[in-house]
Structures are given as C-alpha cells and as structure tokens.
Amino acid sequence: MTSTSSTSARTWVGVGTLLAGTLLPPLDFFIVNLAIPSIQDDLGGGDILGQQIVASYAATYAVMLTLGGRLGDLYGRRRVFLVGLVGFALASLLCGSAGEPWLLIVGRILQGLTAALMAPQSLALIRASLDGRDQTIALGFHSATFGLAAVIGQSLGGLLVTADIWGLGWRSIFLINLPVAALGLVGSLFLHDPHTRGVEKLDVVGAVLLFTGLAGIVIPLIEGQALGWPWWCFVLFIVAAGVLHRFWRYESTFDGNRPRERHIMPLVPPRAVTAPGVRTALVAVALFYSIAAFFLIFSEHEQAVGRTPLEASLDILPLGIGFLIGPLTVPHLMRIMPRRIAALGLCLETIGFLVFAGLVATLDQTPWAAAPLALIGFGQGLALPSLIRITVTHIPRAFAGLASGLVSATLQISAALSVAIIGGIFYATADAYGSTHAITTVSILIAVLLFVSSLLSLRAERALSLKSPSKIVGAHDPETPQTTEGEVLSQERDH
C-alpha cells in the first residue's frame, strides 16, 4: 500500500480504531487531574490519595510500555491491542465504581497496565501495515490524537464533574471510557495484523529485570519531589542503574548462536537498538519531551499571578490547538521538504519558548503570549510524528512493537525526568525570585534542550539516509515481505 488511493476504506477504519487506543491513555492522564479535589472530598485520603491517583497510573504505564510493545511482536499486535482495550474498559469501570481509596488505586494500576498493552500496538500496526504517504498520514493522525487528548483533557474533567451527569460526579471521568472502548471493539473487526508469529517465547528473565530497573527510576521521579527527595529515592536510582546494566548484559548473551535462542526471543535485542542512529533518535525524543514539565509550570504560574482555573485553561488552549493542527500538515509539508521536518518543528518550538519568555518577562501577563504558545504547539505537532517516523524506521518492521514501546517509554520517562528536574528548578527559582522570573528561566532552559534535540534529529536522519536498503528490513520498500523477527536476527548473525 503505497498511496492513499490504493489503501482500502477498511484499512482506514482500522486506523481510526487504533487512534481510539492512542487517545485513551493520555486522555485519562489529563482528565483525572481536574477531578482530584472532588475525589478527595468523596473518598477522603487527602493529598496522599491525590498523589497516588496520578503516580500509580503514570508509573505502571511508563514501566510496562516496552514489555507491552514486545508482547505484540510475539503474540500478535491485534490480539494484544484487544486485550488491552477490554482490560482498560474493565479497569475504568472498577475506578468509576470504587467506594474505597484502595480500590480506586488498584483500578488505576490496572488502567496503567492495560494502557501499556494497548497503546504501543497502535503505532506498531501503523508501522507494519502502511507504507509511504499512507504511513505518513496515519502517523500525523496518531500525533494529532495526542494534541486532541491535551485539548479536551484539560477541560473535560472539570466539565464532567461540574455537570454531575446522573449524579455520578467524578466517577463519570472514568466511565466515559466505556463507550469509547465499545466503539473501538466494533472497529477492531476492521483491523489487520500482517505480522506472522513464530514459536518464540517471552523473555521472562529480561522482562523482570527491565521492569525492576525502570520501576527503580520512574517511581522516585514521580514521588520524590512531593516527598522531599528522601534517601530511599537515591538508593533506588543506584540499584536501578545496576539492574538495567545487568539487563543489558543478559540481553547481549542472545547475540551468540545458543540453543535457547531457538525458543526464547530477547525482550530488547541489542542488534535492533544499537544500529546507527537509533540511540541518537531516542535521545532526541527524550529531549523533545522536556516540554512535559511546562504544562505543570504554566498552571502554577497562572495561579501565582491570580488567574482562575478557567482563565488558565483558556490561556494555554492555543498550545493545544497548535499541537492538534501541526501533525495534520506534515503530509502536505513533506511534498515540499521530505526531510528535516522534525528539526523544523523543534526550531519553531525553540523560537516560541524564547518569545514566550521575553513576553512574560516584559509584560508579566501570559494572555499576551497566545501567539508563541500556538507556535510552540504547532512545532510540537510537526516534530512528534517526524521523530517517531525517524526512530521506528531505524528499527526493522519485525520489531515494530518493540520500536513503539521504546518510543512511548522514552516519552513517559522523559516526562517524569522533566517534571522532576525542570519542575524542581522552577519551584526553587520561584521561591527565591518569584514566579515570573522562574517561568522565564525554565522556558529558556526548555528552548535550549529543544534546540539540541533538533540537532540530534538531523544527525539521526542523516544516519538513516546513509543506510543501505538491505540494512533496513521493510523500512522503505513497500514490496519487502514482512520478515519475522527470528529471520531478522538470523540474518544479522550470518552477517
């Protein structure tokens, strides 16, 4: 399928279904924040419950994403997507009917787990089943969905709680996932998974090591700042580094021609992620998402200067609208400049943040900053699908689930790092010099990180162009057969 005209309507209905799976995880993250006060009033638990509602979901989701993508590679992406979709709906029902705080936290953990099964399959199936311009268009829709989640998530939670539909109050923010999941189930009839599964088994040892290592990083990042960075956070960081090193050494043992390789496929095959450009692209993705802290910082600054929650949501709306529009323009922009779109988007973001910092520093009123915020969102919308395309194209199609999981996990872990580090700088600066000085400082810092990301994206794209077609299994050639993962690793060992 190399052109839009040659792609059947059935395929695009399937893509729409995948976008439902893309929408639900970030929407659930944004929408719950505005309902936390109502949940605390109803169930009790105070600030601790509020932190746990956010952290339990975010930590589980981030830690499980790579494994979720890998399960799709091994057992079928459509199958794993449906398990995740149904599981997410059931977990949402549990959250919406919870009468005790502990039951709500269990539901949030299950939401994070099932979201990690569902979300990577969306990108993986787009990568595996579409080519050329069709794939570019689908990736644009995929990224626009994140913008849509940001736009409606910022306001829908408060709207649903205020409307108190059928007396459900805060519970409606979870129960609204059920009709979306039902539509997704109907649409799943149109999904096609071109992946041919072999007899490989899950790398359980690798999964346990990776889960433990990532948990040791993500949990302190999410909880550390709220708890004042207790000593155990730093102990977990050190232990996590050792566990992840052990994980990598264990995965590297699969590179040899050993008998166990006939039955167990490594969770993260080193040869799949050490190709030229892969690590550079992932670092570019991580730096790109340094913007994640800005949403929290912006809200804090708005409150500090006396803006109401409604005014604050309207002030940041231009960023969400720009993020929604940006990805939709990528297919058209590619006709003019097929390369360097990621770098262009990141540079637009850099300019937007510098202008925003200047306006806030001189005028001290963020409503005047609507134009640079829209530019930031538009640049983000251009950069995200292009960075994803660069990253996943470096990795053979047989590893599409792995590639999707790695990109999604990188984004989530980067978001946690951004909130912990950049958020910490904001609060420290605000205490010493005031909120206006603090948001100006961190905006300039984010601009620098985005500019570095743009340079890395150019380097990763250059590495991709230097690869010979034979080294990129199924990356560009629509006629390349869907090589299985075992065949890819076998071919690499022969080389």
Image (cartoon, rainbow, N blue to C red):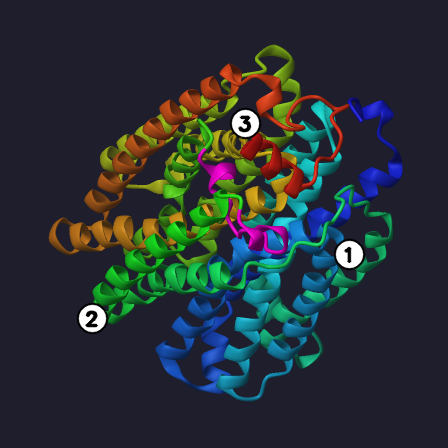
Residue that carries the numbered disc 1 in the rendered image: 184
Q: Can you tell which quarter of the image residue 127 is in?
A: top right
| Residue at 32% in and 55% down | 300
Q: In the image, what residue occupies the spot 59% across and 63% down?
A: 159
Question: Secondary structure beneath disc 3?
Answer: loop
Q: CA distance from mark 1 to mark 2?
A: 43 Å
Lower sequence index among marks 1 and 3: 1
Q: Which residues are magenta?
A: 258-274
Mark 3 Cα-neighbour bin, 10 Å: few <14, some 14–19, many ≥20 = few
Q: Residue at x 71, y 23 (%)?
A: 133
Q: Position of residue 329 (x, y in %)?
A: 62, 25
Question: Which residue position holds label 2?
Answer: 230
Q: Locate residue 270 relative to residue 118 in the image: left or right.
A: left
Quadrant in which the N terminus appears: top right
Specify few, some or many for label 2: CA neighbours under 10 Å numbering under 14, 14-19, or 20 or more.
Answer: few
Specify the amino acid type for callout 3: His
> Where's the C terminus, which quadrant?
top right
Q: Amino acid at mark 1?
A: Gly
- Residue 187, given in percent of the width and then of the height, sits at 83, 52
Residue 283 sits in which quadrant? top left
Amino acid carrying label 2: it is Pro
> Is disc 1 placed on a helix, strand or loop?
helix
Question: Element under label 2?
Answer: loop
> Which residue position holds label 3?
495
Looking at marks 2 and 3 on the same chain, the residue that comes earlier in the sequence is marked by 2
Q: Is residue 267 magenta?
A: yes
Q: Position of residue 494 (x, y in %)?
A: 57, 31
Residue 302 shows up from this direction: no
